[in-house]
Image (cartoon, grey):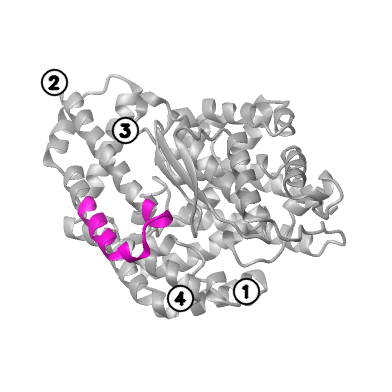
Amino acid sequence: MTALTELMAFQRDTEALGEVAGRLGWDQETVMPRGAAEQRSAEMAAMEAVLHARRTDPRIGDWLAAATPATEVEAANLREISRSYARNTKVPARLAAELARVTSLAQGKWAAARAADDVAAFLPVLREVVDLRREEASALATDGALYDALLEDYEPGATEAGIAALFDRMRPRLVSLRDRVLGASHAPAPLEGRFAEDGQLALSQTLALAFGYDLEIGRIDLAVHPFSSGSGRDVRITTRVAETDPFNCFYSTIHEVGHATYEQGVDPAHLLTPIGRGASMGVHESQSRIYENQLGRGRAFTGWLFDQMTAQFGDLGISDPDAFYGAVNRLSPGYIRTEADEVQYNLHVMLRFDLERDLIAGRLDVADLEEAWNTRFAADFGVAVDKPSNGVLQDVHWSVGLFGYFPTYTLGNLYAGCLFEAMKRDLPAWENGLAKGDATACTAWLRSALQQHGALRMPAETIEAACGHAPSEAPLLDYLDAKFAEIYRL
């Protein structure tokens, strides 16, 4: 066998084991017995030790040195293996296993602390997670840029300085639009009432199918924090239900379906190879956010959803599809990022970005995190946090060590704005199917332009290839200005 053939055979088994490790995480957040947490943390640590040993096997270096790619696909796979090998060989096996063990435990402690609104119960394990991630970043960083080293795991090529500059450009327009909307003389009425869990879950499945989620190779479960897991022929999503807020369930489902259909849409030839997955978390978020917002919250689709909800729940107390469209897109100064409207969502991300980079840099101590969060939230949103589950405990990310992940949500929104502009250019009748609850044309465009390629290209190149131009925040901000000026009659 050639060096390339041997390397790819070895890598295929590593990718398969990585999927098994991911399934352990899915199980932990959905159906694992609560008393199994300690054992699961040991299982996760053992699996990570095996994976780390494979990812740092010296033969990989030899194979990379000898391999000669003949195609774009082979070159991309070698690029990803080389990047992974370079990073993993800098991280001690002990540290990799300990991170897996502690973050597995921390996820359960976070869930319990969130349910009890008990920050003090979570902070000790969070401190462990932060310390371990700082140690990992120190091992990875070549120039002392700890946060950049962590960003690389989620958005290759991104930097703290670049993200900060982007947020500084976006913030003034977002705040201006938010203030104009909240000060408008006209505002849509909210959806009110109680909506039974079984009805929400039934309609949630209908929504998943409408956006192309293949339930033959996927499933929908409940979790504290919705997420998507897996790739290829086994991609799973979760949602959550609040009887007084059905939009939470429906748009969480559509959001996670965006992630899942991306993974299901990657060319099967790339299955269990390094490029057989999303190009980055930012590109992944572009799919979940365009499904959820530009498509799912658009006037055409909400008109169909109005009819579906009326059929499922009876009179909604909202007069017509136009009023329902307003209710779906209504702005309110809420606490929860995942429930935030399109205008304020990125302000939630910016808060987390600033706090987590201060934690990693050592400018903010874990003991002071809650106070820092509450102070910043009041300044940014004009509302005092009423309880920790609406504040610092609301997101799962820090408990499982995902420092550097939050900025990718805004990058995803930015990429989605670019993709939506390109899709409308290429599909003049893009709303026709959505008005009937059929997103086939839109999802087919996304699959052809982006999803099928997986990680063939680097993140920014993936978006540029799909849209015909480099990523920019302008299409997103222009879209938001136009949409909410119409809804609020500005």
Q: CA distance from mark 2 to mark 4?
A: 54 Å
**Does residue 97 appear left or right of residue 296 in this picture?**
left
* Spot occupied by residue 151 in the image (x, y as percentages of width and height): 39, 53
Say if 267 sits above or below 320 in the image.
above
For the C terminus, the quadrant is bottom right
Q: Taking the image as drawn, is residue 485 in sight?
A: no
Query: Between 204 and 363, which is closer to the camera in this rendering?
Result: 204
Asked if residue 40 lies in the magenta stretch, the reply is yes
Say if 208 sits above or below 271 in the image.
below
Residue carrying label 2: 1
Mark in the foreground, 3 or 1:
3
Q: How would you rate the neighbour count of disc 1 (Cα within 10 Å): few for under 14, some for 14-19, many for 20 or more?
A: few
Mark in the foreground, 3 or 4:
3
Residue carrying label 3: 272
Q: Secondary structure at mark 1?
A: helix
Q: Which mark is residue 369?
A: 4
Mark in the foreground, 2 or 1:
2
Earlier along the polypeptide chain: callout 3 or callout 4?
Answer: 3
Asked if residue 398 lies in the magenta stretch, the reply is no
Earlier along the polypeptide chain: callout 2 or callout 1?
Answer: 2
Earlier along the polypeptide chain: callout 4 or callout 1?
Answer: 4
Q: CA distance from mark 2 to mark 3?
A: 19 Å
Q: Residue at x 82, y 54 (%)?
A: 488
Earlier along the polypeptide chain: callout 2 or callout 3?
Answer: 2
Q: Which residues are magenta?
A: 27-48
Amino acid tagged 2: Met
**Does residue 209 appear left or right of residue 27 in this picture?**
right
Amino acid tagged 1: Ala
Mark 2–mark 1 contact, CB under 8 Å? no
Q: CA distance from mark 3 to mark 1?
A: 46 Å
Query: In which image quadrant can residue 46 be found?
Result: bottom left
Earlier along the polypeptide chain: callout 3 or callout 1?
Answer: 3
